[in-house]
């Protein structure tokens, strides 16, 4: 399994709670804290802009509480609830929360939740990967289902409600969003999201700067919000 960095956000109406969880996350290189939000509605924008793997979510908040918020999302990321109230635990696990942390949260308890998340991700990769079989995804284009080997993908670009998949064999235009396809490809070693509109296969990158990468004669920009994690991966 590759050295994956998981993107996470913190939603809590108490700024001090955001700072505490943020400081805990800084101790783990596997996690990138994309941002902290004092209300759930403000967090929706980032959820629509890029894939988020994990949300640390308070329950009692003004406007919409954490439970209502997570129920409103069609395919929510993994959720760890962080709350001062013990009496919502049953409701939290009904929405498939990974864990339920009661404030004030000791680091040792936080560590247990983090390990639970990492174990969950490892199991998901192992269950979905057969080392004896090539890695394929199936993409629908022009009313046909195309079996595409992931290693043959050069890069993928977003066309709003469509994506154009560039492969060593040619191009496919598919009716799907880049975020959905990114979720399918998230755990493949060479696949890297570098921009809100681009996913690339690092295997085919011939050169890169802090602003862009080159694949063949195509120069692809690195988005500002992806720059830190992308350059870290490319430097490896």
Image: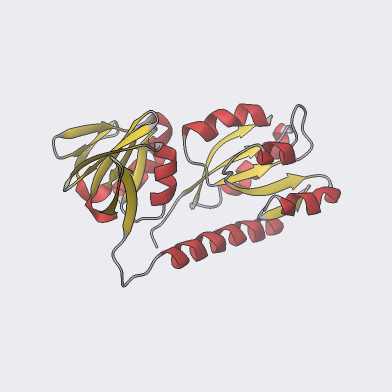
At a point 58% along the width and 31% down the height, the residue shown is 44
At a point 41% along the width and 36% down the height, the residue shown is 177
Looking at the image, residue 170 sits to the left or right of residue 13; the answer is left
Question: Is residue 115 placed above or below 31 in the rendered structure?
Answer: below
**Total count of labels:** 0
The location of residue 144, given as percent across then percent down, is 29, 46
The location of residue 199, given as percent across then percent down, is 33, 40
Residue 86 visible to an observer of this rendering: yes
Task: Check the image and tell me how it is coloured.
Answer: secondary structure
Furthest-bottom residue in this view: 132
Question: Is residue 105 placed above or below 71 in the rendered structure?
Answer: below
Name the one closer to the observer, 21 or 97.
97
Name the one closer to the observer, 101 or 142.
142
At a point 69% along the width and 55% down the height, the residue shown is 99
Which image quadrant is residue 223 in? top left
User: Could you tell me which quadrant the N terminus lies in?
Assistant: bottom left
At a point 53% along the width and 52% down the height, the residue shown is 28
The location of residue 220, given as percent across then percent down, is 25, 33
Residue 106 visible to an observer of this rendering: no
Name the one closer to the observer, 168 or 52.
168
Furthest-left residue in this view: 217
The location of residue 146, given as percent across then percent down, is 28, 50
Looking at the image, residue 66 sits to the left or right of residue 188; the answer is right
Furthest-front residue in this view: 143
């Amino acid at each position: 399994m590759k050295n994956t960095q998981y993107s996470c956000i913190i939603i809590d109406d108490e700024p001090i709670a955001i700072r505490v969880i943020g400081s805990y996350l800084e101790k783990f290189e596997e996690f990138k804290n994309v941002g902290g939000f004092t209300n759930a509605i403000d967090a929706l924008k980032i959820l629509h802009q890029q894939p988020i793997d994990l949300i640390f979510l308070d329950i009692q908040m003004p406007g919409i509480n954490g439970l209502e918020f997570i129920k409103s999302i069609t395919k929510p990321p993994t959720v760890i609830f962080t709350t001062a109230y013990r009496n919502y635990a049953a409701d939290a696990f009904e929405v498939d929360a990974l864990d339920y942390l009661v404030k004030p949260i000791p680091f040792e308890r936080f560590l247990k939740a983090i390990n639970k998340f990492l174990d969950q991700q490892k199991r998901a990769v192992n269950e979905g990967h057969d080392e004896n079989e090539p890695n394929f995804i199936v993409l629908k284009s022009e009313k046909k289902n195309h079996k595409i080997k992931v290693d043959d993908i050069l890069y993928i670009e977003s066309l709003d409600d469509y994506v154009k998949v560039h492969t060593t064999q040619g191009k496919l235009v598919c009716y799907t969003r880049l975020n959905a396809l990114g979720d399918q490809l998230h755990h493949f070693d060479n696949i890297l999201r570098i921009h809100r509109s681009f996913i690339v296969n690092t295997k085919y990158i011939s050169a890169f700067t802090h602003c862009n990468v080159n694949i063949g004669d195509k120069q692809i920009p690195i988005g500002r919000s992806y720059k830190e994690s992308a350059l870290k991966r490319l430097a490896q």
